[in-house]
Image (spheres, rainbow, N blue to C red):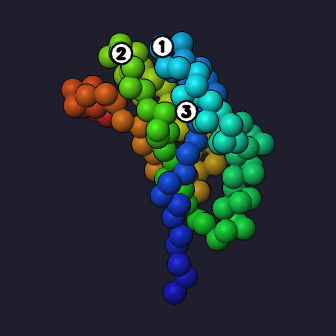
């Protein structure tokens, strides 16, 4: 039986999303670590990610934006940020469907989550 190895702690930090967080009040100090991880959605970084997965024998990653979640003062901006990053993840999964089958970015409150995930 072949093992199916899943990386359950895979960060993906699109630059446009990090820019959005900063534009809505998140400190550039807080987003700097994400920018420096080489974990963006740029094609060369995605290709390197897939190569590393292949080398490590990982078949799947659960993409996560933590700890860069959209915990913003403005609830509407927080929901917009959650939608934005989830949409980016969905587009990335369409481009490269096989290793990225799950995604997660929480909205700020229960009501926002219901509104977001039922769309």
> Cα distance, mark 2 to mark 1?
8 Å
Residue wearing tag 2: 73
Q: Residue 24 carries which label?
A: 1
Q: Residues within 10 Å of mark 3 (few under 14, many from 20)?
A: some
Q: Nearer the viewer, residue 64 or 35?
A: 35
Q: Estimate the x, y position of residue 102 in percent, counting from the top left.
A: 46, 50
Q: Estimate the x, y position of residue 77 in percent, counting from the top left.
A: 40, 15
> Cα distance, mark 2 to mark 3?
22 Å
Q: Estimate the x, y position of residue 48 in percent, counting from the top left.
A: 75, 51
Image point (49%, 20%), residue name: 26
Q: Where on the picture, by quarter, is residue 52?
A: bottom right
> Cα distance, mark 3 to mark 1?
18 Å
Q: Residue 88 carries which label?
A: 3
Q: Where on the picture, by quarter, is residue 106?
A: top left
Left or right relative to 106: residue 50: right
Any part of residue 20 in sight = no
Q: How crowded is mark 1: few (under 14 residues within 10 Å), some or many (20 or more)?
A: some
User: Quick check: 46 above or below 33?
Assistant: below
Most distant residue in the left direction: 111
Q: Estimate the x, y position of residue 34 in percent, counting from the top left.
A: 60, 36
Any part of residue 46 in sight = yes
The numbered mark, 3 or 1, whose residue comes first in the sequence reads 1
Image point (49%, 33%), residue name: 68
Q: Which of 26 and 86 is in front in this view?
A: 26
Quarter of the picture containing the C terminus is top left
SS type, badge 3: helix
The numbered mark, 2 or 3, whose residue comes first in the sequence reads 2
Q: Disc 3 vs disc 1: which is toward the camera? A: 1
Q: Residues within 10 Å of mark 2 (few under 14, many from 20)?
A: few
The numbered mark, 2 or 1, whose residue comes first in the sequence reads 1
Q: Nearer the viewer, residue 16 or 87?
A: 16
- C-beta proximity under 8 Å, tags 2 and 1: yes
């Amino acid at each position: 039986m072949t093992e199916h190895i899943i990386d359950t702690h895979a960060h993906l930090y699109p630059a446009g999303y990090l820019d959005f967080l900063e534009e809505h009040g998140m400190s550039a100090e807080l987003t700097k670590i994400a920018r420096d991880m080489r974990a963006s959605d740029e094609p060369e970084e995605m290709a390197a990610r897939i190569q590393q997965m292949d080398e490590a024998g990982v078949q799947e990653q659960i993409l996560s934006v933590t700890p860069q979640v959209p915990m913003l003062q403005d609830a509407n901006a927080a929901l917009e940020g959650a939608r934005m990053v989830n949409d980016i993840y969905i587009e990335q999964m369409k481009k490269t469907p096989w290793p990225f089958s799950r995604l997660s970015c929480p909205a700020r409150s229960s009501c926002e989550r219901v509104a977001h995930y039922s769309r």
